[in-house]
Amino acid sequence: MPEPVAPAVPPTPPVPLQALLAREDLGLRQIAGPADPGIVIHWAHTSEMADPYPYLLGGELLLTAGVHVPEGAGSGGYFDDYVSRIVAAGGAALGFGLAPVHDTVPPALVAACERHGLPLLEVPPQTTFSGVARAVWQLMAQARLAELRRVTEAQQSLAAAASRPDPVPSVLRRLARHLGGTAVLYGPDGTEVAGAGREAPDGVRAALAELAGVVRPATDPDRPPPAPPAPGPTPPPPGSRPRPGSPAPAAPAPPAPAGTGHRPYPAPAPTGPTPPPAGSPPRPHPAADPAGASPRSGRAAPHPTAGPAGASLPHGSGPGPRPDAVPPSGPTPSPAGPRTRPHPGSAVPAAPAPPAAGAAARPHPASATDTCGSTHLAVYALGAGAGFVLGVAAPRRDPGDHTIASVAAVLLSLLTGEHRSGAGAARSSALVRLLLGAPPEQVAPLLGTGRWLVVHARPEAQAPDAVAASALGAALGSPLVDLAGDVVRVLVPADREPPPQSGWTLGVSAPAGPPEWPAADTQAARALARARATRSPLVRHAARPALEDLVPRADADTHARALLAPLAGQAALAETLRTWLSLHGSWDRSAVALGVHRNTVRQRIARCAALLAVDLDDPDVRMELWFALRRT
């Protein structure tokens, strides 16, 4: 069921009300309202308006000297209306200053605060309101410094854990200790890969595992996304009393699965304080949750957190699994002006129309939060669609917890990046076996089954480096990259058709098994030379049947060796003749493909004609030589 929007609060650590009362220099005394140690305030504000509602954002300690109190207010309903408006605006507490207007706090105000559950503080005459505000900001600065110190220490601790021999369990143990809860790493199939920390109840573990599915990429691309909640007015929180004349609340949505407290579709985070709809009950004041949550509203408010550098990562908040967003530090102005707020009874804005059919699919959120009873849940997707998810369950949510969990998520993303299918370990094992003398045929199964393509690539500008070679391998979908001088060689599975790459010239071999890899390497090199000579971005080696397939292989090889015997031991001449024939006798393109001067090509071709005693202008001679060169 939709919940009322919690008041917007600034991105600063909240100050416990008890910490302000403990300041002996202020001499504040609570005389009414709940004495809950979890009640927090986000700032102090002074107002002598009879209706402070339009000027409050939520979470304030409102300070007043009672100038606005009329004569005979104690016998009517003035104070009850005044306190109800403060509670409706989300005020955290009320401070009443003694002297010069009132010598004592009016008893009717004390009674009204007790009825509405608003903490009432007595401010002695010697304490100025500016002094109270300064004390609030001092406590905020101290809390902020403590939060940054805690986050910094946690970052250093997690980084040290990632360098241990067992990095993943070590990071999870440190994270669970810093958050005081449970940390779980889920695999792409949803099973628990590793876990650490306190033993969570079965209901909490089930809810955390279900929440992890919200951020895990879907394995079925045809599965339609869940339907968004139907638009409509926000109903009052459970147990609240509707105002007279208020419209009937909308029917509640179907209940969520047992063991969880979240809605099945992620809802967007609020962008600012939302005026109450017509007939809605007063908004409760924030209390209990140090991250700015309001226990009386029944939902967890978004809490922005930042690291030492001030960076903030998006994170989920609220009772449902939703993509997290950091709320702005100030309110969103209403259409009527920046200092106006609709009063109860005003018209409710029309709900936005549902998205049209065929709209773009909503991307999976990077993180989401939920609650299961009194336990706070959070999940974080690791890597770019790898399927690993970090889950955290803790009995509380303190400032900085999201930043600490985000640091752990980054480290675990790096640690699990090569662990998707054991590819990193398999490549390492293949390399060790080759170095120890194993033949390629025995090593190839470690890299995958099936046939492979050999790709030779050369950049169009400067010589390639290791970073460019790795980027090319990632673009072709293979980590098997070799930087060999000015050419990059990549081994690609045959089921992946290498596309042209901007800024590169590519030559691709025919599909080959491990025993044929050396021949495929030669094919890719020749295809690259042809691509550079013809200024083509990509040339593939032709693997279709040819006339030579009509001749038995042994006979063809014998004929080729006999015909090319005069060129034996002169590889440069044979390669020049092969290139020149493949480029239809073009001197310039042959020179480009071989990387030599065109006169060098002319001299080598003339030498070949002399040694072979043939006329290279005769097409029959060219065809016979090309047939022989293809057999070598």
Image (cartoon, helix red, strand yellow):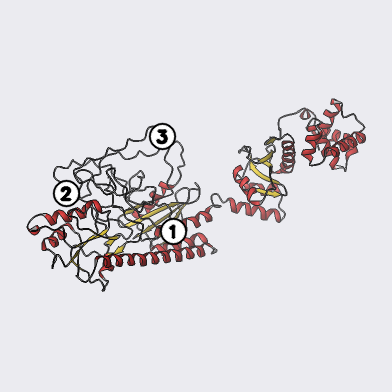
Mark before the other along the chain sequence, 2 or 1 = 2
To which residue does mark 3 refer?
A: 359
What residue type is disc 1 on?
Answer: Gly
The residue that mark 1 highlights is 310
In-image side of 360 versus 630 (left or right):
left
- Which kind of residue does numbered mark 3 sit on? Ala
Closer to the chain start, of discs 3 and 1, is: 1
621 shown above or below 394: above
- Secondary structure under tag 3 reads loop
What number is the disc on residue 384? none
What residue did someone put label 2 on?
A: 241
Left or right of 618 in this view: 358:
left
Q: Which quadrant would residue 540 be assigned to in this image?
A: top right
**Badge 2 local density, few (<14 within 10 Å), some, or many (20+)?**
few
Mark 2 and mark 3 residues within 8 Å of each other at the beta carbon: no
Label 3 and label 1: CA atoms lie apart by 35 Å
